[in-house]
Amino acid sequence: MRGKLMFLTGLAAGFVLGSRAGREKYEEIRANAQKLWEHPTVQEAAGVAQAQANKLYTEGKDKLQSSKLGEKLHTTGTTGRSTDTTDELLAPSDSLTAAPKSTSTGTTY
């Protein structure tokens, strides 16, 4: 109970202080964050992280498909749906800002 009370107190204090700082301070913080994100060193690190994530994704997908579970999923997934459901669900090239993706079942996310 004490932890929840401390959390709510901190939340209230942050709200009050944040609302007093106003839109100007928010815009200043946002501009600084944008400048940091666009820095070449940060972009290079993000590119390296993306490449590593893609490599791990590919290795994991290959291991899953070559395993007994992957073979079972591959053989049971042939009932009129896409057989490669791992690509559909976990594609590493998807980004948070991309347009909604439509699947073979007509579902959009």
Image (cartoon, helix red, strand yellow):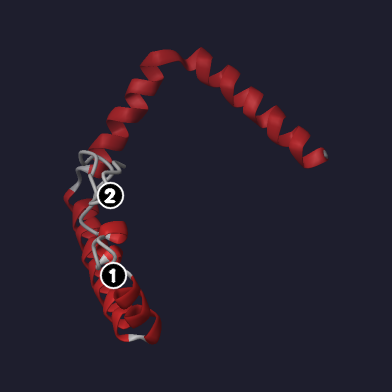
Q: Residue at x 75, y 37 (%)?
A: 4
Q: Earlier in the sequence, mark 2 or mark 1?
A: 1
Q: What amino acid type is highlighted by mark number 1?
A: Tyr
Q: Residue at x 40, y 20 (%)?
A: 25
In this picture, residue 54 sits left or right of residue 18: left
Which residue corresponds to mark 2?
Answer: 105
Distance from the alpha carbon under mark 2 to that under mark 1? 24 Å
Relative vertical location of residue 23 with respect to residue 51 in this rendering, above or below: above
Query: Dividing the picture into quarters, in which one does residue 90 lie?
Result: bottom left
Q: Secondary structure at mark 2?
A: loop
Q: Position of residue 18 (x, y in %)?
A: 52, 20
Q: Position of residue 97 (x, y in %)?
A: 24, 39
In this picture, residue 104 sits left or right of residue 30: left
> Which is in the foreground here, disc 2 or disc 1?
2
Which label is found at residue 73? none
Q: Residue furthest front?
A: 79
Relative vertical location of residue 14 with respect to residue 98 in this rendering, above or below: above
In this picture, residue 23 sits left or right of residue 61: right
Q: What amino acid type is highlighted by mark number 2?
A: Thr
Callout 2 touching callout 1 (CB < 8 Å): no
Crowding near pointer 2: few (<14 within 10 Å), some, many (20+)? few
Which label is found at residue 57? 1
Q: Position of residue 20 (x, y in %)?
A: 52, 13
Number of residue marks: 2
In this picture, residue 85 sits left or right of residue 16: left
Crowding near pointer 1: few (<14 within 10 Å), some, many (20+)? some
Query: Dividing the picture into quarters, in which one does residue 3 lie?
Result: top right
Q: Residue at x 70, y 30 (%)?
A: 8
